[in-house]
Image: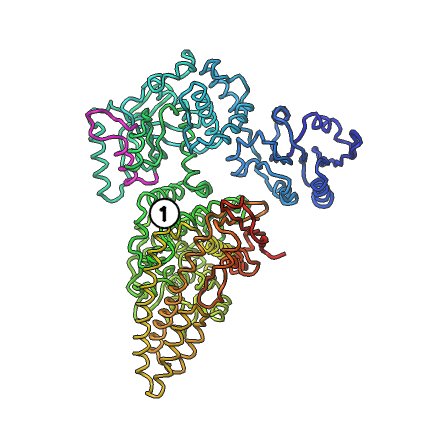
Amino acid sequence: MIYFHFNQFLSQLRQRSKNYLDQKGTRWYGKCVGCYQVVVFPENEELKEAFERYIRYVIGSNCGLWIITEPVSESDVKSIWKKVLEEKNTRPLLFIRLTDSFISSFKLLEKVIERGDIWRPIDSKVAIAEILKNLIRQEKKITNPFNELEQKYREIKKWFNNSLNLDQDCHTFLSNMRKVEASCLFRAEIGHGEGTSSDSFQSSVKLQIYDFLRAKVLRKKEKLKVLFIDNNPDRELKTIDERFTKIVNKNEAPQKVLNVLKEGFKLIDSQLYIRDSDFKDLDFKELYRELEKKVREPVSEDTVIPCKEIKDNGAITVNVSLKDLDMALIDIALGKEQEVDGIDFVNILRELRPELPAFILSMHTDYAIVKSAFSRGCDFYIPKNQVFSIPYVYDAYIDEIGEVVRFIKEKELRRSLLGNIRYWHFKKQFLWFGDKCYHMIDHGFAHAKDNWEMTNNILPPLLRSGILKEEYECGVNSDELIYAFSMAIWLHDIGHKGNRHYGEPHLIRDTHGIISGELILSQGHYFGIKEVWPKAKEFNAFYENLIFPVGDQRKPVTQLLLEQLKRKRTDKPEKNKQEKRLTITEMIALFSIYHKGNTPLTEKDYYNLKERGKFIPLDLFENSDRTQPIIPLERILVEIGDDEFSEHFLALVALFRFIDGIDIHITRVGDPNEEALKKWVIQRDLEYNLDRLKELVRKMALQTSKELQPLFVKNFYLDVREKIENGASLAINRLANEFRVFFKSYEDAALLEEYLMLVNYCYFLKAQPGHFKLHAAVEKINVQYIESRSFCFTLYTPHEKGYLEKHKIFEVGKEEETLYDRLIDGNRCYILRELIEGERYLKNFIKYVEIKLKSSSTDSTDLEIGKPVSWPSK
């Protein structure tokens, strides 16, 4: 349903049988549809015509909804909402605003809207046909959260006296608070700036009540189990902040922190557990020591702590398993004689159960204490005078981690992803230690974090549009795919460590995705990968501790993946249909192996890469031999026997490549000192590797006749070095063909492999200063989801057009280009190239992309540079 002015709405209800209406000389077009009516208002002529065309020629009599396109006042919306409740409406809701000044009252339900239950407010540029088609498809009936929310709000109002000014109804209160929050620069993820005045404190409490109610809307049927560690949970509110005494109603309100938490978690149907100082036989110090012992042991499934389970009529003592908890709140001060404090527990719980978010909840707001808490590892610090916000803290934290997490419905997978990301945030070197390509553009934590943020900009709206099936014929479900995709975003570059076969930077650079896949398969237990398919452990065991390539036949990781699927498929297929599938670990490995552009997704891609002179690693060929068949990703997926899954997985890999490929960002370069030092190191490394190239060519030349040696050295060293130093275009494949004129045996093929990789690496090193300029030219990338699987990418550069046109970069196999060309040229824009590279599969997920470049320099106010670039081209 789509609503506008209430009086006109009522008028239409009374005149449902009429098809044409006139009011004040304006013609309204309407059509009866079942027991509802479709009505279009002519405030915006272009929009009106779009509605009319779609209603007239497409919808026919297959849908019942009201369409109204004008903005409304707050009172109008409230009145309409009440009318909807009276009619017990169960159809989806859609609000369209046409003026920038109008703020939807239902913005407060943004989180619910994003999860697909209620349509988000949109502007007039939206594609009407797409909205209505999606609206028609939505079969799930929604329930209105406002009835229960209104009742709870009336109860909360009784907790406070008139000084808090809560006389308005729930609808108006939520609407007003949403506006206040939007205008509050001091609003953090959780907690509200309270200032020192009574007015600012009252505003803070109102926003806390807003969080309190919002938690109810968000939680739905998903209950939380929450642990509260505090030596004095019965502390009264007035002892935390005396300003509570001026606004709290003593006769109605919960007077203690524990009671506020009890009411809050009861509201969202969640369970609160308390660990206080009453447990004399196992005080906080002893409890900490017990947990510390667990850290040194293998992860235990039964790490339990005794605590009190809060009930309506009191509390009972129970043992709670840490693996069952969703969140822990811990006071920073646990008693003078305890020798441990809340930060100690936050850190030990993160080591023991990283999937369990543990936050400090303290009455102390002193700067030194807060600073110390963060320096010691706290990731959320919540003052106790923000206690009414606590039921919302879990959702605030999930939003901070990444919205994609919300789309994983399987609790164990969601908790695993949450825990891994949290762990990697605090142990940034765990995944990326031993980086042997340290002088390249950053491929460590900062890059993975940028990719994760971009994933959270792009993937959620696509998932809401239904790009994935709930479950595929092969048995893989959407939760597993989203989880594997997300894990690979963080793990795909861990191969920079190298392996026994590739140990030097020039070897690792082109094969690090393959090395990442090998690590994930053979050492997956180190990376916190969770499997939910019962047979997964059995199949993953095949790869454990393998050293690649395997055996005398030198089988690469891609060949083993292919053969594993063949075994599953041919082993009594009539009884083992569900075994024709990938494990989550295998999917993460495949995302990583095929994330680079030199790994073909299809056989056609392979020939295109060869034609363009791209270096393709040996690990993509059977038996690590270029004379043997290529193993593109499509060839592996075909063995599963589920065409739809294969198509969607290939599209996800293409999307993965796109996200990884567009991460050009100044943070990957570092500050000017870092950049200058890296450039110096790179130049020395280039000189060193050119000397290595000279020595390698000299040794190879000795295997030719004396007459050919001078020509060999000229062709393969002198000419190549000159091209590298001058940044001239270099065709790797042509070198390979010339090489084969001199050498044809298998041993020589291995020599050629090393030579080509070293040449490629030297060329890459020479190009690095240009890459630094390219990354330094992009301050940020803003991603806006337009509608209908369409996006607008806006690049912000600190430079102006003249600078971008002056500075040039080059890459192996490509002509020299300017920064301007690479950022926004209609044919050479790097984002456009990534889209074209993956177009065969990306078009299944993304319909349209517009790319803009704006200058953020002080001399120009977001001045647009060049013309926007679009894909597919118009």
Looking at numbered disc 1 in the image, what kind of residue is underneath it? Lys
User: Residue 11 vs residue 237: left or right?
Assistant: right
| Residue on which disc 1 sits | 530
Q: Where is residue 705 in the image (x, y as percent from the top left)?
A: 33, 87
Give the quarter of the figure containing the N terminus. top right
Q: Which residue is at 62% across, 23% downward? A: 75
Dot 1 falls on a residue whose secondary structure is loop
Which corner quadrant of the image does residue 760 belong to? bottom left
Magenta range? 331-355
Front residue (pair 22, 148): 22
Kindly give the residue lying farthest to the front in the view shown: 859
Q: In this view, does 203 lie above or below 482?
A: above
Q: Which residue is at 28% across, 28% downward? A: 332
Front residue (pair 269, 811): 811
User: Residue 225 vs residue 799: left or right?
Assistant: left
User: Residue 438 vs residue 857: left or right?
Assistant: left
Kindly give the residue lying farthest to the top in the view shown: 251
Residue 841 visible? The answer is no
- Judging from the image, the colouring scheme is rainbow
User: Residue 541 vs residue 730: left or right?
Assistant: left
Q: Is residue 302 above or below residue 434?
A: above
Q: In this view, does 227 lie above or below 406?
A: above
Front residue (pair 43, 776): 776
Is 251 in the magenta? no
Which corner quadrant of the image does residue 623 belong to? bottom left
Q: Position of residue 86 (x, y in %)?
A: 62, 24
Residue 783 visible? The answer is yes
Q: Where is residue 95 in the image (x, y as percent from the top left)?
A: 62, 34
Q: In this view, does 770 lie above or below 630?
A: above
